[in-house]
Amino acid sequence: MGQNVEHYDDRETMSADEREAALLERLPHQIAHAKANAPAFTKRLEGITPSEITSREALAGLPVTRKSELMELQKENPPFGGFTTLQPGKLARLFSSPGPIYDPESRVADYWRFGRALYAAGFRSGDLIQNCFSYHFTPAASMTEGGAAALGCAVIPAGVGQTEMQAQTMADLQPSGYVGTPSFLKIILEKGDELGLDLSCLKRGIVSAEPFPPSLQTFFADRGIDVYECYASADVGMIAYQTPAREGLVIEDDILVEIVRPGTGDPVAEGEVGEVVVTTFNEAYPLLRFATGDLSAIMSGVSPCGRTNKRIKGWMGRADQTTKVKGMFVHPSQVAEVLRRHPEVTKGRLVVAQESSRDLMTLRCEVNQSDDLLARAIEESIQSICKLRGQVEFVSPNVLPNDGKVIEDVRTFE
């Protein structure tokens, strides 16, 4: 591992160019491996020459696999939709996430790459961690277990629920760390107060799976607990984690992250909000351009903590903004197709409103110069692609918010 005091290993401080070169060198090998050994990618990558995928621009030409597709794909080809390279009996664990979506775990140490995030949050060999992620079906608790083992930490497999027992166990066993959701940690601490238990043993934590608002951050800080957040997925594992700099989340070193316009596979400019798309180097589950359905944005510059990988702003909402208008679904991909047909539009947002109980669609378009002919052409495209009528409103460049929204539903149903 090559740990130093501040960083998990030397990879965290390598130059951006060195890291990018190392990742891109691995990329064609992973694509070739997926194409040869995962039946779903054998089909999806037909006509693709892996050795030619040596840049982010080339990577952006590969098809996106959406999390929202996985459930149906897994039903068609159980249990993993043809995306794994190992038979189920060769895996270590098989998980079931809500949907259901089934997630594999191989026998590779720290399979979910959680150790780096734990280290950044202050966990060290010999620490005792109360693991309050669920051990029931979903992989969150296993993510912690793998990272803790990699660091040499011991784990209390506490899981969720049984608040009084959680607090009593914490008081008896004196763990220095907590891993779980932030809201549950607050509940445990308040239960400890109610029972008159001393839980001052707790010094650090890492939380995920739900928002971590400033009010909770202050609550833990006031009790002397240094709590960090991370962003992970049951499909691709650790994606990004908070460091002592507390400026965004640093991207994990063993993945490639793109931010794309929702409904497309097209990367957006740095700083623009879009959907998080992850390419992994996981041999058992080689997900390529996996669209998580989450929104975020790449931050400029590097972290003051010394880690040189790119940072994201954290979880900023859901990318799947599909809505129903006049009884018909309208998808972000349809809006993207309308915009693609009219390159004069630099950015667009479909606003769905209601007037006298009647649904109205207005496509707000950023343009440098507008005219009636362009408006009519866009309206015809809306009708053709969405099978619904929509109006067009032109606005100046940089007027639309940078929040990743392609469809904004402002209707109120009372």
Image (spheres, helix red, strand yellow):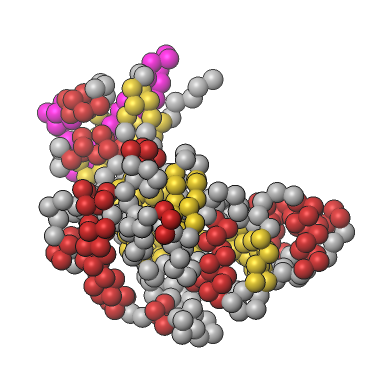
Q: In this view, does 400 lie above or below 246?
A: above
Pinpoint residue 157: horizontal percent, then vertical percent.
Answer: 66, 61
Residue 54 in the figure: left or right of residue 83: left
Task: Tell me what residue is drawn at x 27 percent, y 49 percent.
Answer: 40
Closer-to-camera residue (159/375): 159
Task: Give the residues drawn in magenta, as a range.
Answer: 352-378
Task: Tell me what residue is drawn at x 87 percent, y 59 percent.
Answer: 196
Residue 362 is a magenta residue? yes
Closer-to-camera residue (399/106): 106
Pinpoint residue 165: horizontal percent, then vertical percent.
Answer: 78, 55
Task: Tell me what residue is drawn at x 34 percent, y 64 percent.
Answer: 283
Pinpoint residue 197: horizontal percent, then vertical percent.
Answer: 85, 61
Residue 96 in the figure: left or right of residue 380: right
Q: Is residue 45 above or below residue 365?
A: below
Task: Tell me what residue is drawn at x 60 percent, y 53 percent.
Answer: 135
Residue 297 is a magenta residue? no
